[in-house]
Amino acid sequence: MTIKKIHLKDKKEKTPLRGHPWIFSGAIQDRDAGIDDGDIVSVCDSRGNRLGCGYFNSKTRIAVRMLCFGSQEFTPDYLRMLIRTAVGKRTGSPLLRNTDSYRIIFSEGDHIPGLIVDSYAGHLVMQCLTLGIDRLRETIVNILNDEIKPASIYERSDHEGRSLEGLDPVLAQRYGTTPHDLVMHEDDMKYYVNLLQGQKTGFYLDQRDNRALVRKAAEGRDVLNLFCYSGGFSVAAALGGARRILSVDSSGPALDLAKKNMDLNRVNTPTDFLQADIFQFLRDETITGDFIILDPPALAKTRASVHNACRGYKDLHLQVASKCPAGTVILTCSCSRFIDMRLFQMVIFGAFTDAGRKASIIGKYAQPCDHPTNIFCPETEYLKALLLHVE
Ligand code: SAH
């Protein structure tokens, strides 16, 4: 079967020539008749030279996500090579020796746009984010089985972004049986993870390095863990010798899991849990903690929402900055891809200026090694964290 072609407008070849995998719809000059959404297409410059191939969707602003560049053809063997490379990056890494759970495939970060696979103690959770990847599902499951020999594979394709692709959510057991209450290990910490219903694929694997940081920084501190979810940071703080911990989240099931996780780790630090809207909580309550963890959900989910998201981040920091005692340490995180470190820092700067408080940055952090940033696709860099010291 010959692959149909799309031609880019003059000069628009620069992006794929640099290895960036996204072709926006506005960059396309014309396309062969009969290309369906989800098809693999050849991408050519305006003179007909082949730039590579990718999968097409007319419904999304990113019309093509590139799977290979130059004269390389996209075949099941090529996909197997990409998956094998991604797996090899993790399984051989001394940086991941302290855990049995990590991300094995990170979409564009591993040159497979639209595919996420996380491994929890040998059980895989996969997410197909795009129509192009949906079409490759069966091949992907077969390759994962061959290359990883997992205990099970569960598909959690319930990411909200799928609706933009014209796709419904899919939840399905693809291989074996995935347990409801799996326990994962990270250093000597243990966490219950709900792979079938928990947030994301069950756990915030991307905060692993920051959990280690919290564990180091928490000694003797009164910790306020805001947006705690299943208590990842609370357990780390407790094992790091925190004096007291208050964990806050708006989700009841998240707090139940956080409690279970504290028990699982036999934490005897005085610990409280509070179900509350944190924006309101910060307005109403005085802050007693002197180590505050701020890890809200992505407040900017689209480029258009950046302005409002910045107001949200500023509001949170303004409340904290106005109320926290001198000497407080704050770990503040943003997982909004559309807000880069410079903008994040500017928003925090604005909040502290308005609050009339002095603070300094004593650490800057990013996502861990199993969430690699594709150097040709800076958009894959999304997690930012700052450790602040308030005077
Ligand atoms: N820090 C967590 C991950 C946080 S994810 C970890 O390391 O595991 C964001 C969390 O914020 C979710 O658990 C969600 O339930 C909660 N959340 C979202 N909006 C909220 C709000 N307005 N007030 C309180 N919690 C909120």
Image: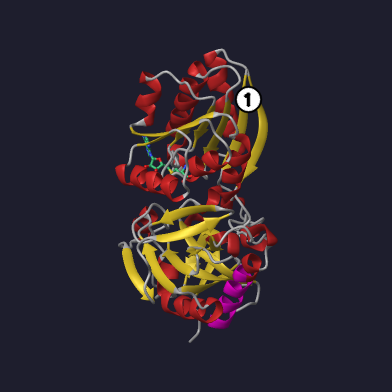
Q: How many marks?
A: 1
Instruction: Please tell me which residue lies in front, 75 or 288.
Output: 288
Up/down of 146 relative to 56, above or below: below
The structure residue drawn at horizontal position 59% and vertical position 44%, both measured from the top left corner, is 210
Q: Quadrant of residue 61?
A: bottom left
* Image x and y of residue 141, in percent: 45, 76
Q: Residues within 10 Å of mark 1 (few under 14, many from 20)?
A: some
For the C terminus, the image quarter is top right
Magenta residue check for 81: yes
Q: Amino acid at mark 1?
A: His
Instruction: Please tell me which residue lies in front, 156 or 102.
Output: 102
* Image x and y of residue 390, in percent: 60, 21
Up/down of 235 relative to 278, above or below: below
Residue 84 shows in the view: yes
- Which residue is denoted by mark 1 in the rendering? 389
The structure residue drawn at horizontal position 45% and vertical position 38%, both measured from the top left corner, is 296
The structure residue drawn at horizontal position 30% and vertical position 62%, both measured from the top left corner, is 168
Q: Is residue 182 left or right of residue 75?
A: left
Instruction: Please tell me which residue lies in front, 22 or 339.
Output: 339
Q: Is residue 292 left or right of residue 155?
A: right
Quick one: SS at disc 1? Answer: strand
Q: Is residue 158 left or right of residue 100?
A: left
The structure residue drawn at horizontal position 61% and vertical position 48%, both measured from the top left corner, is 209
* Image x and y of residue 7, in percent: 54, 67
Q: Residue furthest bottom?
A: 1
Residue 74 shows in the view: no
Q: Is mark 1 within 8 Å of ligand 1?
A: no
* Image x and y of residue 370, in percent: 60, 58
Residue range (magenta): 75-87
Up/down of 85 relative to 308, above or below: below
Please name the colour scheme applied to the rendered image: secondary structure
Ligand 1 image position (quadrant): top left
